[in-house]
Amino acid sequence: MDVSFLGGPQPQLGLGVVAPFDFALDRELWRWVPDDVSLHLTRTPFVPVEVSLDLARMVSEHETLRAAVEALSAVSPQAIAYACTSGSFVGGLAGERAMTAAMVQAGAVLSLTTSGALIEALRELDAWHIAVVTPYTRSVTDSLEAFLGEAGITVTGRAYLGLTRHIWQVPYRDVVAMARTAVADGTDALFISCTNLPTYDAIPQLEAELRMPVVSANQVTLWAALRAIGVRAVGPYQALLDPVARAGPAGMTPA
């Protein structure tokens, strides 16, 4: 059958994503992306180091970023996101800004990081007092809290798992249990850290239970990257992405 009349597939917008070598949640990222956008992922080189502050520094070195951006530039993405929370907060606010600048110098038209996207999302939600849950060790969680403090955001409560490997295998029930532990009075929103931690299906459940917005590392990364190119992320019943959810249970005060 002659299909030449179809004229080929519709043009796709492209987002480049630089992820750490151990990133295992490609499919989760795609769940926030509409059909007319393609994700182009590349990974940082393997280093034999467990999840730690040392690893965060290694996977965010500017030379590593430049090489990844140059590789992604071959497919001309409209923006490039560095999808690693710890790698983008370990150097503080100044370090995060330097990373985005290095990515632009390497050829990215627009650049952003997960931690930069987090600050943007919290400001969008007017959330200045947040609870934090992480799969990290205490030292890495402390570094996240320090980064948020630099941005004027207060951590009202936190919980962490102390993991140094295989974070992508953590089940939703563990994420929910940490959230229940971390949330305290006076909390505006909950942040679930680490791009290697599954969160997509847990967000609506937690927003309905906690009566506050819940944001996660992968969610804010895709939200910010898509918004930068004029596209809305897909996320029903997630307050950051869905105005109905923001005005519904996520906007209610806990009993």
Image: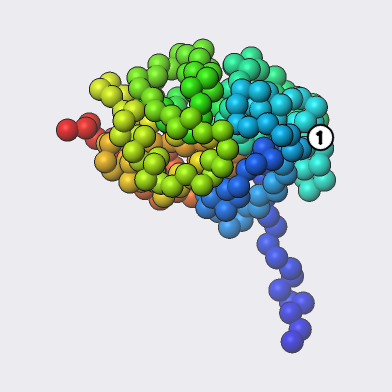
At 34% from the left edge and 28% from the top edge, which residue is drawn?
Answer: 182
Residue 80, horizontal then vertical, whole percent = 69, 38
Residue 235, horizontal then vertical, whole percent = 45, 48
Residue 190 in view in this figure: yes
Indicate the secondary structure of the residue bearing disc 1: helix
Q: Kindly identify which residue carries mark 1.
A: 67
Q: Identify which residue, 138 or 254, lies in the foreground.
A: 138
At 80% from the left edge and 27% from the top edge, which residue is drawn?
Answer: 63
When asked about the image quadrant of residue 187, the answer is top left
Total numbered labels placed on residues in the image: 1
Position of 125 relative to 168 (above/below) = above
Of all residues, the one furthest to the bottom in this rendering is 1
Q: Amino acid at mark 1?
A: Ala
Q: Name the quadrant of the C terminus.
A: top left
At 78% from the left edge and 48% from the top edge, which residue is drawn?
Answer: 75
Q: Identify which residue, 96 or 37, lies in the foreground.
A: 96
Q: Identify which residue, 99 or 181, lies in the foreground.
A: 181
The reply, left or right, for residue 60 in relation to residue 135 is: right
Classed neighbour count for the residue bearing mark 1: other residues with Cα under 10 Å, few (<14), some (14–19), many (≥20) = some
Residue 165, horizontal then vertical, whole percent = 58, 38
Of all residues, the one furthest to the left in this rendering is 255
Q: Name the quadrant of the N terminus.
A: bottom right
Q: Identify which residue, 42 or 118, lies in the foreground.
A: 42
At 75% from the left edge and 31% from the top edge, which residue is drawn?
Answer: 65
When asked about the image quadrant of residue 19, the answer is top right
The reply, left or right, for residue 180 in relation to residue 221 is: left
Residue 144 in view in this figure: no
The reply, left or right, for residue 224 in relation to residue 66 is: left
Position of 236 relative to 148 (above/below) = below
